[in-house]
């Protein structure tokens, strides 16, 4: 089946970036949100990011306008029935994702692949909710999606080779580099990255160093392009906490215990860049 129209669920940090790259890649996009205000915010971000690419001469003004015109925003999930492929990029909570996958399994044609951009939740568990577990897969993009090259492609236990090959090919068509991994809490990227970010938070909580000092250590000593606390703010502290909790529950090892300071900051609504305050102010 030729993939022409792609459904994206969620227009937040990741969903709007994923819609951006598919639209730029000449795919029709249906971007689905729960409320018009979230949809408007996501579409405004896509417009701003496309304009930035025009300013940098990466795209012409006509190409940018054409990409934007390929994106249709919807609140009614039933519109996804037109799609040939779906990527879910909604909030990192199993209850939310299970409700979505149960719903889209009913709405989308049986031959349509349903991918999740989850950072840590089991693809096998998500797939088991549907009647097409062989067509469910992890397609894990990285933030900011238009810039980052990697797509971590996660095979659930039942994912078919055909599904994997389709997603690998699609990632390449978007100009990304797919890397295959198997299903495990946090996959590879977050299994390794999140404990680093969490440990950096412990050093701040214990008064070992300021956020600025921790970030400087990693930028100057390890040549990281940004420090772990800046990165945590960019990812979203709520997203970091959700991922740590999935790994703590799924792997059962106390080394994945979320830092109490992270829990407190999320409780305070300090979610990082998106809320204007995290380890830094924005
Ligand atoms: P976000 O909070 O910025 O956006 C999530 C969006 O999903 C919100 O706008 C919310 O309204 C929407 N949503 C919730 N329930 C929905 C539903 N039923 N239907 C449609 N939309 C719904 O979160 P995010 O950072 O974009 O994360 C989305 C997913 O991507 C998560 O699974 C996350 O783990 C993953 N992810 C995040 C990052 C990152 O750096 N933030 C990187 C890779 C993967």
Image (spheres, rainbow, N blue to C red):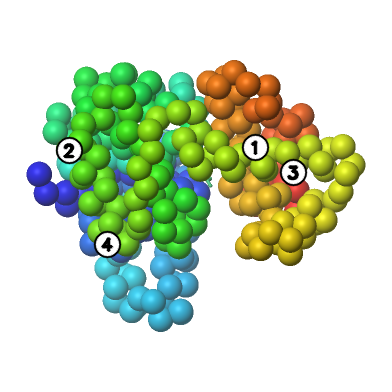
Residue at mark 4: 25
Residue at mark 1: 195
Neighbor class of circle 2 (other Cα within 10 Å; few <14, some 14-19, many 20+) is few
Question: Please, what secondary structure does the residue beneath circle 4 have?
Answer: loop
Q: Is residue 183 left or right of residue 107?
A: right
Q: Is residue 234 left or right of residue 211?
A: left
Q: Earlier in the sequence, mark 1 or mark 3?
A: 1
Give how far across and how far down residue 278 sits, in percent: 72, 47
Question: Please, what secondary structure does the residue beneath circle 3 have?
Answer: helix
Name the residue: 76% across, 29% down: 260
Q: Are marks 4 and 1 in contact (CB under 8 Å)?
A: no
Q: Find the distance from the CA under tag 1 to the CA under tag 3.
A: 8 Å
Residue at mark 3: 200
Residue at mark 2: 162
Q: Find the distance from the CA under tag 2 to the CA under tag 4.
A: 22 Å
Q: Earlier in the sequence, mark 2 or mark 3?
A: 2
Q: Find the distance from the CA under tag 2 to the CA under tag 3.
A: 41 Å
Q: Earlier in the sequence, mark 2 or mark 4?
A: 4
The quarter of the rendered structure image containing the C terminus is bottom right
Neighbor class of circle 1 (other Cα within 10 Å; few <14, some 14-19, many 20+) is some
Q: Is residue 166 above or below residue 61?
A: above
Q: Is residue 233 above or below residue 105?
A: below
Name the residue: 69% across, 59% down: 222
Give how far across and how far down residue 81 sits, in percent: 19, 36
Q: Find the distance from the CA under tag 4 to the CA under tag 1.
A: 34 Å
Q: Which callout, 2 or 4, points to the residue nearer the camera? A: 2
Q: Which callout, 4 or 1, points to the residue nearer the camera? A: 1
Q: Is residue 170 left or right of residue 240?
A: left
- Disc on res. 265: none
């Amino acid at each position: 089946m030729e993939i022409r129209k792609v459904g994206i669920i969620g227009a937040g940090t990741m969903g709007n970036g994923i819609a951006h790259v598919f639209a730029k890649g000449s795919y029709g996009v249906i971007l689905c949100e729960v409320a018009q205000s979230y949809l408007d915010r996501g579409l405004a971000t896509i417009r701003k990011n496309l304009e930035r690419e025009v300013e940098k001469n990466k795209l012409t003004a006509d190409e940018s306008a054409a990409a934007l015109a390929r994106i249709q925003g919807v609140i009614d999930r039933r519109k996804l029935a037109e799609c040939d492929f779906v990527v879910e990029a909604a909030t990192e909570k199993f209850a939310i994702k299970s409700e979505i996958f149960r719903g889209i399994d009913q709405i989308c044609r049986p031959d349509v692949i349903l991918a999740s951009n989850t950072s840590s939740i089991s693809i096998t568990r998500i797939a088991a909710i549907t009647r097409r577990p062989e067509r469910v897969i992890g397609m894990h993009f990285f933030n900011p999606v238009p810039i980052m090259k990697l797509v971590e492609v996660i095979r659930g236990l039942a994912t078919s080779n055909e599904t994997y090959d389709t997603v690998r090919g699609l990632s390449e068509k978007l100009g990304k580099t797919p890397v295959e991994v198997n299903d495990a809490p946090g996959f590879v990227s977050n299994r390794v990255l999140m404990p680093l970010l969490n440990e950096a938070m412990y050093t701040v909580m214990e008064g070992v160093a300021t956020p600025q000092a921790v970030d400087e250590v990693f930028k100057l000593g390890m040549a990281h392009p940004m420090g772990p606390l800046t990165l945590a703010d960019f990812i979203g502290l709520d997203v970091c906490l959700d991922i740590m909790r999935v790994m703590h529950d799924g792997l059962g090892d106390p080394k994945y215990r979320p830092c109490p300071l992270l829990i407190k900051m999320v409780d305070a609504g300090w979610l990082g860049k998106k809320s204007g305050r995290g380890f830094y102010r924005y």
